[in-house]
Each structure stands twice: as C-alpha cells, then as structure tokens.
Amino acid sequence: MKIIDIECHVLLADDYDASFTSSAQDSLLVVLKTDDGIEGYGESDLNPWIGKACIEAPGTHTMGLSMRDLLLGADISDISDIRAIWEKIYTQTAMNGRRGAVIHALGALEMALWDIAGKAAGKPLHALLGQQRDTPVVPYASLQPAGGSFEAYRDALCASARDAVDLGFKAVKAECTMNGPYAHSGLNESYDRHTEVVAAVRDAIGPEVTLMVDVQYLWRDAETAASVARDWVEFDLYFLETPIWPDFIDEHRKLADMIPIPIASGEWLATRWEFVDLIENGGIGVAQPDVGRVGGITEAQAVCALAQTRGLPVVPHCWKTGVSISATAHLAFARPEIAFIEYLPPQLCLEKLRRELAHEDLVFENGEIAPPTKPGLGVEINWDAVRAYKVA
Ligand SMILES: [Mg+2]
C-alpha cells in the first residue's frame, strides 16, 4: 500500500479574530491517499500556511529535501513503516527546520498515516497503538471565555464552568489570561484580578470538581510567579499551566520548588527531545504534549513513556478540530498515564471549525468518553466546511 497523493488544506474561519486567544480559528488539514483507495486525515496546530509550505516546499539538497517528495510513493503496508517514514523525513529535512513548524507539520502527516493504518486493518487507532486502558477516558472542559472587560471575562468563565459541571464534566480548566503575551482581547489586568478570577471559578464549581488553571506564559521568572500563585494554593488546583515562558527551564524548576501546585507545560514542544529537557530539568509535574505539534502520535507516545518513568501524569494539549481531538483520545486509550484529555463537545465551542469540520467517533457521557470503535481515527470530514473555509 503506497501513498499516491497529499493534499494540504489551509482553513480559516470566516469570522476569525486575530485578537481572540484561540488557535482553533484556523487549521492545517492534510489528506493522504493510498493506491488502494484509503484516505487518511491529519491536522496540526500551527499557522496553516506555514505548515503547508513545510510539506510542499521543493527540496534543494540532501539534508533539505521535500517532505512531500519523501512521502509520495512511500509504502505503509505495516505499522512499523510509519516510524521508518517519520525517521526518514525527520533526517532528510533536518536543515528545513529540526524543530518547530517542520515537526508540527510532520505531526499532521504522521497522524494521517496512522489513520490509514487503522482503516486498512479495520481497527480503531487505539487498538493499533496497544490499548492499555479498559476504563473510560476522562476529559476536562477547557474554558476560553470571550469578553473584552474584566467583569465580562470573569462572568463568562464562571458561567461556562457551571455549564460544564452541569453537563457532567469532572474537571474544568480556566484560561486565566488577562495579561502577558497571550492576553485575551487586549486585556491588561492586575495579578490580584487573576486571583479574583481563580477564586470565582472555584466558587462557581464547588470543591469536588477538579480545577486546572492556565495563565499562558504570564510570567518570565519564578519569584514573580510564586508571589501570585502562592495565594492560589487554597483553590486546590490540579495544575498550573504554562506559568513561565518556555525558554526559561531553570525558572520552571525554581517555581516548582517554591509552590506546591504542580506545573504543567509542553504544549509548544516539538519532538520527545524537547520534553527530555523540560522533564529532567524543569521540575514540571504534568507533561502536555500536543499530538500534532510534538511530531505525531509516536512522538506523543514517547513523551508518555518518558513521563511514566518519572511518575508524571500526562494531560495532552489539544485545541483544534475533531481530527486532533480524536487522535488525542485514541492515544489516551493506549497510554494509562494520561490523566485527562482536553475536550469540549463541538456544540459548546465558539469556533466554527471545531463545530463544523469533522465529526468524531467520541461519545461524552457521565463525564467520560468510551473507547471509539470506528476504524482509524474514526473521523468523518465535512467537505462542505472544507470548501467553505479553504483559503489556500
Ligand atoms: Mg494552554
């Protein structure tokens, strides 16, 4: 079975807002086709024009070959071929970019290869990955409020947190992003007001529901982070996500020594090798690979294995359409150290692509997701949405 065609669709919602803190307004959807008529789907969370260029750019020398050319004609008759193809592309595109966008784009291709392998075998992807979990996967509701003022932001967050609990979610994550590089909609609020928001959300959901908080790189040093986050210990947080800019590994370690709240990080990292540094030297308490960005399902599995040897839970990042969410869910059924997955039912999401692009084979019931049963990722693409939102 050979790859005979590669499509890269750059998708952009027609209502996108560049000041909105959500990367689910665009998507890079890749479609791989085989000579026996199977289509595989993959997706990654990066600027989709850049991702498309990473895949389609012509090669110019031995260590800067074309990802597309390397993949066309590749044989994937066996699942071990997927790793061999990944290694070949990783090596022969090393000078196109050994980390970052090139790896994120490679992740979308690798995801699509797994989808093909599952469909060819007639098995859901988690079965191919070696299912190790016979209990349901527990999702957490990732809450990204709209609202252009402090009060609107706080109230929207509390309202959506209550809605999530009413829907049966056992865990919620509050995006508390009112300052710093990721500040939503131009907000520029004090740290005290961040504390006020975390307190309000905990109050809204009660003491039993697991609460995570994401401040999205709010601080650059451990001292400042700890001076605020110490006040959050009383809110019983499962983790504090990305408190520190990712380059400052030493500051992660210092912060971990200063506060008892586990630090979660890793959503932007590419390859298992970047996680080695974060886990070994950053003192994090929770690893957060994003299946596409890290380089694909096999790389995410490797991060899980590394975390497992250190006794760390994994809570993958995923803020994309049903393609990536399905890949993440299948991974979770194969990796028991995954404590939660990031998930919102499409009808609760503001983003059109999340609601319209893909129908996933995931059933959310009683706060849990049962193992999907359709072959491969189990995703159906809505081609009307692809046509409607395709810009390149
Ligand atoms: Mg985050």
Image (tube, grey):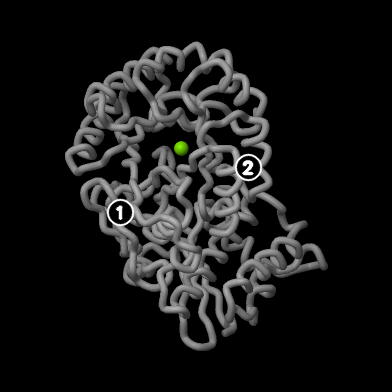
* As drawn, 81 above or below 2: above
Cα–Cα span, label 1 and label 2? 27 Å
Helix, strand or loop for disc 2 = helix
Most foreground residue, 332 or 27: 332
* Disc marking residue 67: none
What residue type is disc 2 on?
A: Phe
Q: Which residue is mark 2?
A: 275
The residue under the point 51% across, 79% down is: 33
* As drawn, 280 above or below 291: above
Name of the residue lying farthest toward the bottom: 36
* Disc marking residue 369: 1
Taking the image as shown, residue 337 lies to the left or right of residue 2, namely: left
Q: Where is residue 16? Give x, y as percent.
A: 38, 48
Specify few, some or many for label 2: CA neighbours under 10 Å numbering under 14, 14-19, or 20 or more: many
Q: Where is residue 112? Give x, y as percent.
A: 51, 68
Q: Where is residue 323? Give x, y as percent.
A: 41, 61
Quarter of the image containing the N terminus? bottom right
Q: Quick one: label 1 or label 2, which is nearer the N terminus?
A: 2
Give residue 175's quadrant in the image.
Answer: top left
Name of the residue lying farthest toward the left: 166
* Disc 1 within 8 angstroms of ligand 1 (CB): no
What residue type is disc 1 on?
A: Ile
The residue under the point 60% across, 26% down is: 252
Residue 12 visible in the current orientation = no
Name of the residue lying farthest toward the right: 62
Residue 88 visible in the current orientation = yes
Helix, strand or loop for disc 1 = strand
The residue under the point 28% across, 53% down is: 346
